[in-house]
Amino acid sequence: MGRPEPCVLFAQTFVQPQLDEYVDEVLFPEPVVVTACEFLEQNAASACSSLKLVGATSPPSFALEVFVQCEGETRFRRLCQPFLYSHSSSNVLEVEAIVTNHLVVEAAIEALAWLCMETPPKILANST
């Protein structure tokens, strides 16, 4: 029996009119627990096999930062250290579980295929 997949909280491709620095955000109607983000390269499928989103990220390499705003906080904070996206490397970013309803990604992009995931507590308990 295989290991259960993480729950996909959000999956979308942000497309911009030209290559430039952009800030894209995701607002959830209620707080969620984020444990990973995945950025899909051009024409690639997600590591989450149940998802049908095909990657459209462009350009092939760039720096990005992911921020969260937690309930009761007035400022955003980094979800993780700045991340170098590259078609030739793993683009699944596992992070310490955090409860939030507001995620922001900042990067110089034309398009970004972005997934946010939650690892169910049962899977987290078995991986420690």
Image: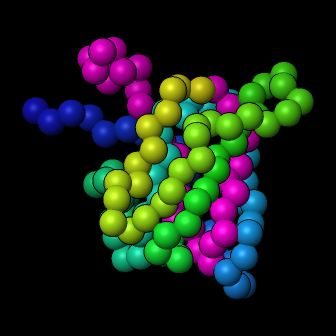
Q: Which residue is at the far left? A: 1
Which of the 4 image quadrants contains residue 108? bottom right
Identify the image's colour scheme: rainbow, by chain, secondary structure or one colour: rainbow
Question: Residue 46: x percent and y percent?
Answer: 35, 59
| Quarter of the figure that contains the C terminus | top left
Residue 23 in percent (x, y) is at 75, 60
Question: In the displayed structure, would residue 17 be above or below residue 60?
Answer: below
Q: Is residue 24 left or right of residue 13?
A: right
Return the residue found at the far right. 74
Left or right: 11 in relation to 125: right
Name the residue rendered at 55%, 34% in the picture: 34
Residue at screen point 51% across, 26% down = 96
Going by the image, does 103 lie left or right of 94? right
Q: Is residue 49 magenta?
A: no
Residue 79 position in % (x across, y down): 62, 36
Residue 115 visible? The answer is no
Q: In the rendered view, would you say 43 is above or below 93?
A: below
Q: Is residue 121 above or below residue 46?
A: above
Q: Nearer the viewer, residue 102 or 75?
A: 75
Viewer-proximal residue, 95 or 103? 95
Residue 123 shows in the view: yes
Residue at 41% x, 20% y is 121
Give, as a single range, the part of the protein colored magenta: 99-128
Question: Is residue 116 shown in magenta?
Answer: yes
Q: Nearer the viewer, residue 12 or 112?
A: 112
Give the number of callouts. 0
Seen at 49% across and 33% down, the residue is 95
Q: Position of residue 41 (x, y in %)?
A: 41, 69
In the figure, residue 54 lies in which quadrant?
bottom left
Which SS type dominates the magenta stretch? strand
